[in-house]
Image: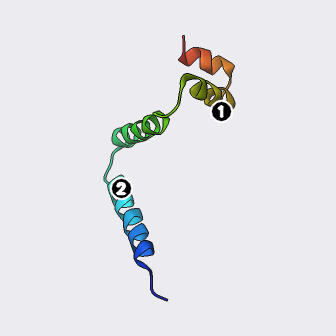
Amino acid sequence: MTNTYTEQLEGLRQRYAEMIVDGLDMNDLITLAVDSIVENLKGYEMDDIKEEVIDCYNVQTWFDLNP
């Protein structure tokens, strides 16, 4: 069975991403993770972030993050 172009492209993306990550140190990985999360949160409003923080952590964490 031959891979379709889409499958080949997905595999290439995966291998390339893994190569990039393998070359990063811990500080770079942390920066990449934080930047990615911030980018994902760009569409969130205050209430969306509040709901997620409370759901994933608790109300006290919300107050700690948003004094």
**Where residue 31 sits in the image (x, y, percent)?**
37, 37
Judged left or right of residue 7, residue 52 is: right
Q: Residue at x 49, y 89 (%)?
A: 1
Q: Residues within 10 Å of mark 1 (few under 14, many from 20)?
A: few
Give residue 58's quadrant in the image.
top right
**Where residue 47 sits in the image (x, y, percent)?**
60, 24
Q: Quadrant of the C terminus?
A: top right
Please say if 50 is above or below 26: above
Judged left or right of residue 58, residue 36 is: left
Q: How is the image coloured?
A: rainbow
Judged left or right of residue 66, residue 24 is: left
Look at label 2 and name its amino acid.
Asp
Q: Write down the residue under mark 1.
A: 56
From this viewpoint, which residue is outermost toward the bottom? 1
Q: Residue at x 45, y 81 (%)?
A: 3
Q: Residues within 10 Å of mark 2 (few under 14, many from 20)?
A: few
Please say if 28 is above or below 65: below
**Where residue 32 sits in the image (x, y, percent)?**
38, 41
Judged left or right of residue 60, residue 27 is: left
From this viewpoint, which residue is outermost toward the top? 67
Number of marks = 2
Give residue 6's quadrant in the image.
bottom left
**Where residue 46 sits in the image (x, y, percent)?**
55, 22
Q: Could you say whether the residue bearing mark 2 is in a helix, strand or loop?
A: helix
The image's mark for residue 22 is 2
